[in-house]
Amino acid sequence: MAIWPIELLHNKKGNAMNNDENRMGITRKQFLRGVTAIAAGSFAAPAILSVTSPAQAAGEGPVKLGFLFDQSGGFGEYGLPAVHAAELAIEEINASGGINGREVEAVIVDTQSDTSRYVSMARMLIGRDKVDAIFGAIGSQDREAIRPIAHAAKIPYFYPTCYEGGVADNWTFCTGVVPEQGFATLIPYMVEQYGANVYDLAADYVWGQLSTLWLNKYVGTAKGKLVGSEAVPLNVSDFNSTLGRVQAAKPNWIYSSLTGKEQSAFFTQRASLGVNIPLSDFVITLAQAGGHRRMKSPVLAGLHETFSYLEELPGERNADFVKRFRAKFPDEVFISQPAQNTYVAVQLYAKAAALAGNVTPIEIVKALETGISYDAPEGTVRVDPKSHHVSHNVHLGKVAQDHTLEIVKSWENIEPFWLGSIGVDLTKKSESRQYSPLDA
């Protein structure tokens, strides 16, 4: 387990964190310098000269959409609800006449929480199945496995999970919440309510590593201070020593980007040791994992989280969505934010195809870049043409002793502005990279 010295978090060279390779084999240094996965050579781009069959070129046959999600393994509980949401969206689109009169067909692959399968299966969907677009991935390392392949093949790729932000790619569209929507709302609230000193617990891969940089940025803006920071490998499930260090640092509150089945043990151990320091995170534990449904109360009591969607979100539009979803999948443990975001992504694709009048990949991109919007279960979302991310209503929830949720604060229509603020405009310039706070 790497412990990051706080003074090194300001190091412009990004040497503060563990430099071990993540699951996809791309180092943190490459990510923070904004090197694209293609340029880094971690995965060779597929040698695909054409991904369109004669029938597709003529606008005949079904519209094929490919879905790459973990339905088993460590991230399986995150991916399965997203698969179900995709199936619901496609069923509803077909019931309404399909896309431009063509039936929509889903090609769904279980990537088994294995990044290497994202690579091989993305190539298969493009080269063998001739899909018109790809949707999927939960972890950031898996997104970065798909993204250069979709970019090289020039087909739209939709990533539905909240993440650490910064992806600028002409063929990628991100429907999840990003730091200027989640961190920028959460951090000032926690500093104001609980105090300036925060301890950071980060999953040791690109999500957690870049989250720490964003945390450092927003804590500094709020006049707070990181009094401790640790990078925790994804396979770690014993947090006794970590909790001892946290208590010794005497923070006012904890920020966590821990994720996955193994790291969820932190919350149980925190409760059993009676560590009552206020806790916060950004989407992961509640909206993505449904931890308040899966874990026994009061393990998560006192957790604060920002999100754009979870099943309990009030409002008629969401109530109707939940009713339709549960009619089709009554045994789903939790309708997650990635599930809703996948549903939204499929609907945005269909709406773009209707606007374009076809499913030619570049025409889909151009249609999305008109600033297309969709009335989602969470509220209306709109594609930002410059960054290919979407606007969100953002909520701050707090977990009670019985694991019910209280929404303590909400922010309407937060735009994904950060990439545009550093000069990214995908309508004018071709890019395929990931920026970090060090690029600002």
Image (cartoon, helix red, strand yellow):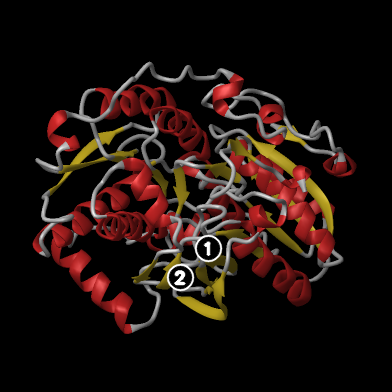
Q: Position of residue 21 (x, y in %)?
A: 62, 23
Q: Quadrant of the N terminus?
A: top right
Q: In 3D space, how far apart are the residues under numbered discs 1 and 2 (Cα atoms)?
A: 7 Å
Q: Position of residue 381 (x, y in %)?
A: 44, 68
Crowd rating for badge 1 (residues with CA inside 10 Å; few <14, some 14–19, many 20+):
many
Q: Is residue 240 visible?
A: no
Q: Amino acid at mark 2?
A: His
Q: Is residue 27 above or below residue 75?
A: above
Cβ–Cβ below 8 Å for labels 1 and 2? Answer: yes
Which picture quadrant has residue 331? bottom left
Image side of residue 346 versus residue 30, left or right:
left
Q: Position of residue 138 (x, y in %)?
A: 43, 43
Which picture quadrant has residue 10? top right
Crowd rating for badge 2 (residues with CA inside 10 Å; few <14, some 14–19, many 20+):
many
Compare residues 232 and 277 and report the one nearer the observer: 232
Compare residues 420 and 394 and report the one nearer the observer: 420
Compare residues 432 and 206 and report the one nearer the observer: 432
Q: Is residue 45 visible?
A: yes
Which picture quadrant has residue 329? bottom left
Q: Is residue 28 above or below residue 93?
A: above
* Residue at left offset 60%, top offset 59%: 281
Q: Position of residue 259 (x, y in %)?
A: 52, 45
Give SS at disc 1. Answer: loop
**Sequence order check: which comes first, mark 1 or mark 2?**
1
Give SS at disc 2. Answer: loop
Q: Is residue 155 above or below residue 424?
A: above
Image side of residue 100 versus residue 304, left or right:
left
Q: Residue under circle 1?
A: 300
Q: Amino acid at mark 1?
A: Leu
Image side of residue 193 versus residue 58, left or right:
right
Q: Residue under circle 2?
A: 403
